[in-house]
Image (spheres, helix red, strand yellow):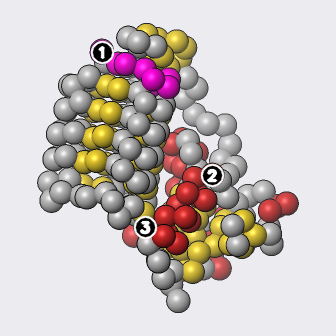
Amino acid sequence: MRELLLIGASGLAREVLSLLRMQSDPRNVLFIDDQPDLWGTSIDEVLVAGGLSEVSNHPTAQIVLCVGRGPARAALVDRLAGLGVTSGRYARVIHHSVEIPDSCRVGAGSILLAGVVLTTDVHLGEHVVVMPHVTLTHGNRVGSFATLCAGVALGGDVNVGSGAYLGMNASVRERIRIGQGAVLGMGSAVLQDVPDYESWVGVPARRLVATTRRLQGAQL
């Protein structure tokens, strides 16, 4: 039986697992996590097989990164590349309610949960996480490792930079750019471009603080 490794024994991993079970996915699922106290235990009846090096013992398994923050997912891709994992091994996970029009693209390793809407000409990069009931409209471009939390809505031709984090129910006006590594607070209403690595909150959204460019370490 084909194996699927969920990297990071997180809440997101449990959501992905629930989706897979609901859709009767035939693959044998294992959790991988760097916390030694979890090794050999089970979460939702799925074994935590070991740390990241355990991936080498499953050379044909597909992989999904289930870590919430984009910079952490990017760091894991680098570590897994060192273990010989290529982009072709990353699986997409898409809820059956999500329709992908022919004009839209979803990159390897991306996760789209229930109720996500893609209208037309929407392009998602690799390892993008899209939580429930996100609305993506015409011409949206979402960079790799971005995270769109539940209820996010993007107007037409919005560009979201790589590793950006859009909090729950954030809304972005059409033709706006959300910079690389930027963070939008919950419920923000964004009416102007957000520079790289800045945090914006409020209605209308305003700059809060500069965010850290790189996540320290790459622990799961």
- Residue 103 rendering spot, x and y as whole percentages: 14, 54
Side of 83 relative to 179 (left or right)? right
Q: Nearer the viewer, residue 196 or 78?
A: 196
Decide which of 20, 174 is in the foreground and name it: 20
Q: Which residue has dot 3 on it? A: 91
| Nearest to viewer (mark 1 / mark 3) | 1
**Residue 149 spot, x, y in % from top left:** 46, 39
**Compared with residue 124, is residue 88 higher up or lower down, i.e. above or below?**
below
Mark 3 or 2, closer to the camera: 2
Q: Which mark is residue 11?
A: 2
- Could you tell me which secondary element the residue under label 3 belongs to? loop
For mark 2, give the secondary structure: helix
Q: Residue at 43% of width from left, 67% of height from top?
A: 91
Q: Main secondary structure of the magenta part?
A: loop
The tag earlier along the polypeptide, 3 or 2, is 2
Picture residue at 17% right of the left edge, 39% below the top: 138
Viewer can see residue 89: no
Q: Which residues are magenta?
A: 183-192
In this orientation, does residue 92 appear? yes
Up-down relation of residue 183 to residue 132 (above or below): above
